[in-house]
Amino acid sequence: MLKNIFASRNRKKEDKKVVIVSGLPRSGTSMMMKMLVEGGLPAVMDSLRQPDEDNPNGYFEIESSKSLKEGNNKWLYSAQGKVVKVISYLLEFLPDDLSYDIIFMERELSEILASQRKMLQRRNEISELSDAEMEAQFREHLRAVKYWTARKPNMRILYVKYSEMVKSPESLCESIVDFLELPLDEKAMQSVPSQSLYRNRS
């Protein structure tokens, strides 16, 4: 009897989903991470990338996520029941034997490009691609991601528009809580989106 109880508890632990916040760079993923953390969802992150002018509230990242392509994914198994940020280019390298609820941030590409341009300027870096080339690559990538994730049985995905979240967080926070089926603090989540940080509008 005790054995069955412990087995049931272990199954419940193993069945917990990993919550993923994803999207293109500069699409609002850090904002969403902060919202979920404020709402009470534990995050998998480190402190290697500190807040700066580009992300005053922090990046909420874990460096290990950047090496998923190289097969560095063992750390994800301790992320069940937690949230982790994984950029859209690395979603395909998530292990198939875990289940995921993905919140995918969408933002106008013109705004993403403007934000990236300013970030590169602050870092004295130059992009090798023109805005037109980068936009074409982004569009093709997003089409591929949406096609691929829709066919993965271990993934559920909710698309959230950055501009709408900043403008009216109340209804979208409710949708996110309903999607995740978790007892998160919606009021705390709603306090995070800031018009003052929406600096690159189309």
Image (tube, rainbow, N blue to C red):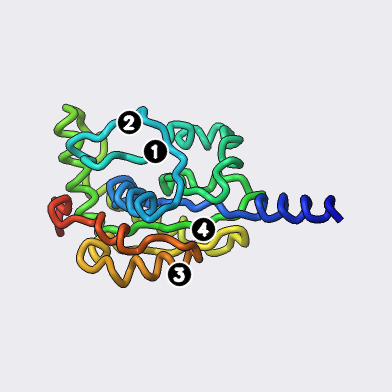
- The residue labelled by disc 3 is 178
Q: Amino acid at mark 3?
A: Asp
Q: Which mark is residue 61?
A: 1
Disc sitting over residue 101 in the figure: 4
Point out the tag, 1 or 3, that comes first from the N-terminus.
1
**Quarter residue 174 falls in:** bottom left
Q: How many marks?
A: 4
In terms of depth relative to the viewer, which is nearer, 197 or 34? 34
Mark 2 = which residue? 49
Identify the disc placed on residue 107.
none
Q: Earlier in the sequence, mark 1 or mark 4?
A: 1
Q: What kind of residue is marked 4?
A: Asp
Mark 2 crowd level (few <14, some 14–19, many ≥20, 10 Å Cα) = few
Of helix, strand and loop, which one carries label 4?
strand
Closer to the N terminus: mark 2 or mark 4?
Answer: 2
Residue type, label 1: Glu
Please name whichever residue, 111 or 59, is drawn nearer the observer in this view of the structure.
Answer: 59
Q: Secondary structure at mark 1?
A: loop
Mark 1 and 2 residues: CB-CB less than 8 Å, in contact?
Answer: yes
> Are the two marked residues, 1 and 3, in contact with CB atoms closer than 8 angstroms?
no
- Mark nearest the camera among 3 and 4 is 3
Q: Residue at x 42, y 51 (%)?
A: 21
Q: Earlier in the sequence, mark 1 or mark 2?
A: 2
Residue at mark 2 to residue at mark 4: CA–CA distance: 25 Å
Between label 3 and label 2, give the one nearer the viewer.
Answer: 3
Residue 48 appears at what percent x and percent y? Answer: 36, 28
